[in-house]
């Protein structure tokens, strides 16, 4: 019989569809990608900025970020769940041991009924024998569910795909973390640069006020110029705390990303006065490569595989579940005879459970599994199209911001030259202070615009690396 059960197990089948990712229409290349884009290693993309402090911050984030550490713990949790589900494929063996000492009552009686030709008589007879009894048992119990229809195999397969999806989720958190650290660092450097420009403008406004006061004292201008210069100075001075506040808040946010308290974090950025630049470092890649590079797409594929496997698990419930059970051990009333051969006992045999009527539950389980697979398919397609959109948006934003930055550089140069010309004319008494203040304000605003445009350009580049799935390699999956 065991031989036939084994052959039946070998001939067993698994139910349900196999995983096959749906076909997605993909363009041959990205619309906004330049013809001569560079082949750049996505793994350490932040090193393109050649900024040692940024490299240090990235390393600290990968080591200490709390979200990433939670994700890694989650991987171990799901790994354990996979092992739990896969253990059902193997025999389950347990040991047992029993030692009982009992005493029965001496006042128990048994009624013995004798049926004869005469009327029935009932006799009360006392129990005889020992009142105290011992019972000892040691042994093993085993059960093995013979997975003829693949229910446990499909369950283990789904659990493994869940484990893979959790790994991809951790990689997605890592990719997002690297992008967030770089973006916050660029934001801090931008604010530092804006604060420096603001302070320079305050110095310029103070010099203009002193010049206006000296000309007023000499009777060369009216007191209106003094008041205008004072208002311009106070305007620039009042804007400085707002920039300092924004810088402090951004540093605090970066400290949280690095998993450390923000109190002692400010001093690390005292010398960050320039926005890190990686000009012209546009990575190249094919749209099809996103399927392999982006962790969110890979995660959606694994979630679809898990949903597909659960269809087979649900369909297998329509069929009987066969198990092979057995036990072996030793029993005795005397402890010294517990481990002798005549005290042995054993049992072995198959069992079957078949749910014949469940009120529609099994049909509903299959329908639920099918609908969840359809949702996973739609989510997979949605994630791919959103990835295409993100890459195209980042490419478009980068190139348009690059054009804008070139115009702003020319604007700053023109405003600087205009400011110098008007200053010379004001000192010669040819124009009013109002013209100089207007030129100073135009120069200041154009300088701030250029700094912010540089920041936007680099943020777009960082976002492009994130959209392309940069920041990890195959070793991160181990």
Image (cartoon, rainbow, N blue to C red):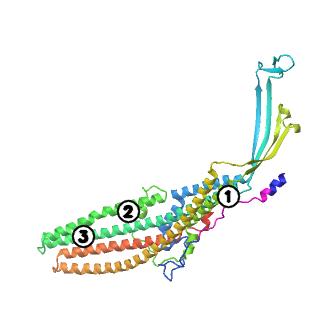
**Residue sitting at 51 percent across and 70 percent down?**
385
In the rendered image, which quarter is residue 250 located in?
A: bottom left
Of the 4 image quadrants, the one containing the C terminus is bottom right
Residue 398: horizontal and vertical position, in percent? Answer: 43, 75
In the rendered image, which quarter is residue 28 located in?
A: bottom right
Q: Which residue is identified by label 2?
A: 247
Q: Which label belongs to residue 284?
A: none
**Residue sitting at 82 percent across and 21 percent down?**
113
Q: Is residue 46 visible?
A: no
Q: Nearer the viewer, mark 1 or mark 2?
A: 1
How far apart are the alpha carbons under marks 1 and 2?
A: 53 Å
**Residue sitting at 84 percent across and 31 percent down?**
334
Dot 2, crowdedness within 10 Å: few (<14), some or many (≥20)? many
Tell me, yes or no, whether the highlighted magenta stretch contains residue 256: no
Q: Nearer the viewer, mark 3 or mark 1?
A: 1
Residue farthest along the front direction in this orientation: 117
Residue 161: horizontal and vertical position, in percent? Answer: 63, 60
Is label 1 in contact with label 2 (beta carbons under 8 Å)?
A: no
Q: Which label belongs to residue 205?
A: 3
Q: Which residue is identified by label 1?
A: 154
Which span is picked out in magenta? Answer: 8-22
């Amino acid at each position: 019989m065991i031989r036939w059960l084994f052959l039946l197990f070998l001939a067993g089948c698994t139910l349900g569809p196999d995983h096959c990712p749906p076909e997605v229409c993909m363009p041959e290349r990205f619309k906004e990608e330049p013809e001569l884009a560079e082949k750049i290693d996505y793994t350490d993309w932040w090193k393109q900025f050649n900024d040692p402090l940024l490299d240090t911050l990235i390393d600290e984030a990968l080591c200490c970020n709390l979200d990433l550490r939670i994700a890694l713990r989650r991987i171990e949790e799901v790994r354990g769940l996979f092992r739990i589900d896969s253990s059902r494929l193997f025999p389950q063996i347990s040991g047992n041991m029993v030692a009982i000492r009992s005493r029965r009552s001496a006042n128990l009686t048994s009624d013995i009924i004798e049926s004869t030709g005469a009327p029935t008589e009932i006799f009360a007879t006392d129990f005889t024998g020992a009142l105290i009894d011992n019972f000892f048992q040691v042994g093993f119990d085993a059960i093995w569910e013979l997975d003829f229809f693949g229910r446990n195999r499909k369950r283990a397969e789904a659990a493994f795909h869940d484990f893979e999806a959790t790994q991809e989720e951790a990689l997605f958190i890592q990719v997002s973390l690297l992008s967030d650290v770089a973006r916050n660092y660029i934001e801090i450097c931008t604010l530092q640069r804006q604060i420096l420009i603001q302070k320079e403008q305050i110095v310029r406004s103070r010099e203009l006020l002193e010049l206006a006061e000296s000309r007023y004292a000499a009777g060369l201008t009216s007191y209106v110029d003094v008041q205008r210069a004072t208002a311009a100075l106070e305007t620039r001075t009042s804007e400085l705390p707002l920039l300092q506040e924004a810088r402090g808040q951004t540093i605090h946010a970066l400290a949280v990303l690095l998993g450390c308290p923000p109190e002692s974090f400010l001093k690390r950025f005292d010398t960050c006065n320039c926005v890190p630049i990686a000009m012209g470092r546009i990575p190249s890649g094919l749209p099809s490569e996103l399927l392999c590079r982006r962790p969110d797409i890979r995660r959606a594929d694994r979630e679809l595989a898990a949903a597909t496997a659960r269809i087979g698990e649900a369909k297998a419930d329509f069929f009987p579940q066969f198990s092979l059970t057995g036990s072996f051990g030793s029993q005795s009333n005397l402890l010294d005879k517990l481990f002798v051969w005549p005290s042995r006992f054993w049992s072995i045999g198959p069992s079957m459970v078949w749910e014949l009527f469940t009120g529609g539950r099994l049909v509903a389980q299959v329908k639920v599994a099918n609908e969840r697979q359809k949702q996973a398919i739609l989510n997979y397609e949605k994630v791919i199209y959103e990835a295409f959109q993100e890459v195209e948006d980042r490419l478009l934003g980068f190139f348009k911001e690059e054009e804008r930055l070139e115009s702003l550089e020319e604007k700053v140069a023109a405003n600087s030259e205009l400011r110098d010309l008007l200053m010379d004319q004001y000192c010669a008494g040819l124009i009013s202070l109002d013209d100089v203040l207007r030129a100073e304000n135009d120069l200041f605003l154009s300088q701030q615009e250029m700094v912010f445009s540089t920041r936007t350009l680099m943020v777009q580049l960082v976002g492009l690396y994130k959209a392309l799935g940069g920041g990890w390699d195959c070793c991160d999956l181990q």
